[in-house]
Image (cartoon, grey):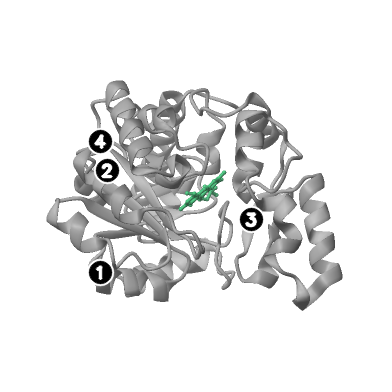
Amino acid sequence: MKTKITEMFGIQHPIIQGGMHFVGFAEMAAAVSNAGGLGIITGLTQGTPEKLANEIARCKDMTDKPFGVNLTFLPTVNAPDYPGLVKAIIDGGVKAVETAGNNPAQVLPFFKDAGVKVIHKCTSVRHALKAQSIGCDAVSVDGFECGGHPGEDDVPNFILLPRAADELEIPFVSSGGMADGRSLVASLAMGAEGMNMGTRFIATKEAPVHENVKQAIVAASELDTRLVMRPLRNTERVMTNEAVERLLEKEKRLGDDLKFEDIIEEVAGVYPKIMMEGEMDAGAWSCGMVAGLIYDIPTCQELMDRIMKQAEDILARMNAMQAA
Ligand SMILES: Cc1cc2nc3c(=O)[nH]c(=O)nc-3n(C[C@H](O)[C@H](O)[C@H](O)COP(=O)(O)O)c2cc1C
């Protein structure tokens, strides 16, 4: 399948693996890229330019296909060394970057000069238009269903994607709730040039996370995620567990008085414990409603082949309907 996204990133299938904290290591990115998609290393999980450079080099040892790096811009007091991370990406010869969070305008000129394509992840049409106006090459449109931060507008993809198609000139991929060939064809029908998946890629053989995380996703239904941190306007969709129930109880009790310090125990520094040690109640971890559509743990190649086969079958069925 050839789309503006496969052309832009030099990939076989129009499928991207979104950056994921403590999941997007070289093993994950290489497995997705080797299977014909665009794998993404999560820059901030590495934290320093040296470690990121090392992770990029490790990924290059595992694949000769294109892969990207995610740079998430967070509103934090101790900002990471973004200029150093940008340099590590460019010096590492990476040609694709997924930005997310705050406006990436400050880093765009460096990437443009180095011929790096930038896809910015946004949760609203107005942010997508902003990304287009500052010169991003593409956007990833993340609906309310998504794992991680869906923003504060709560617009699901059946509305958000066609709205994006009506407004944007640059290509976009769908993101949030995507799992299979049905998701891909539906995304194309709504104007996207491909799709981005997060949660689905965690439940794969190659995902470098504890087996408990994969099993939790397979066991979960579409009813098992919760929205946390809405009072802080930093809403995150997470898998429900003991820590999340405790966090929501605090939100209810403290109302508008809730401060980040009140929930530090449930959200700060919990990813290594969950993703590496498999302590599933250690805190809140991002997970999409799409968990309800995830029934198994295939290899990335099996997953990708299955998605493309299902998409082709649907398209053939639709063609036959038209011919009949
Ligand atoms: C465990 C996990 C961690 C994530 N971490 C990040 C991150 O660090 N930066 C980012 O831009 N997006 C992050 N995301 C969002 C994904 O890149 C992607 O946009 C999202 O998962 C899409 O929704 P889906 O899970 O329904 O496929 C994360 C998602 C998950 C599930």
For marks 1 and 4 on the same chain, the one whose residue lies earlier in the sequence: 4
Q: Secondary structure at mark 1?
A: loop
The residue mark sitting in front, 3 or 2, is 2
The residue mark sitting in front, 2 or 4, is 2
Q: Is mark 3 within 8 Å of ligand 1?
A: no
Picture residue at 78% right of the left edge, 45% below the top: 241
The residue mark sitting in front, 1 or 3, is 3
Residue at the disc numbered 1:
169
Q: Secondary structure at mark 4?
A: loop
Question: Quick check: marks 3 and 2 in contact, CB under 8 Å?
Answer: no
281 vs 84: above or below: above
- Kindly identify the amino acid type of the residue bearing the numbered disc 3: Arg
Q: Nearest the camera: 60 or 140? A: 60
For marks 4 and 3 on the same chain, the one whose residue lies earlier in the sequence: 4
Q: Nearest the camera: 136 or 184? A: 136
- Kindly identify the amino acid type of the residue bearing the numbered disc 2: Ala
- Give residue 228's position: percent from left, percent from top: 69, 60
Q: Residue furthest front?
A: 78
Residue at the disc numbered 2:
88
Q: Nearest the camera: 247 or 166? A: 247
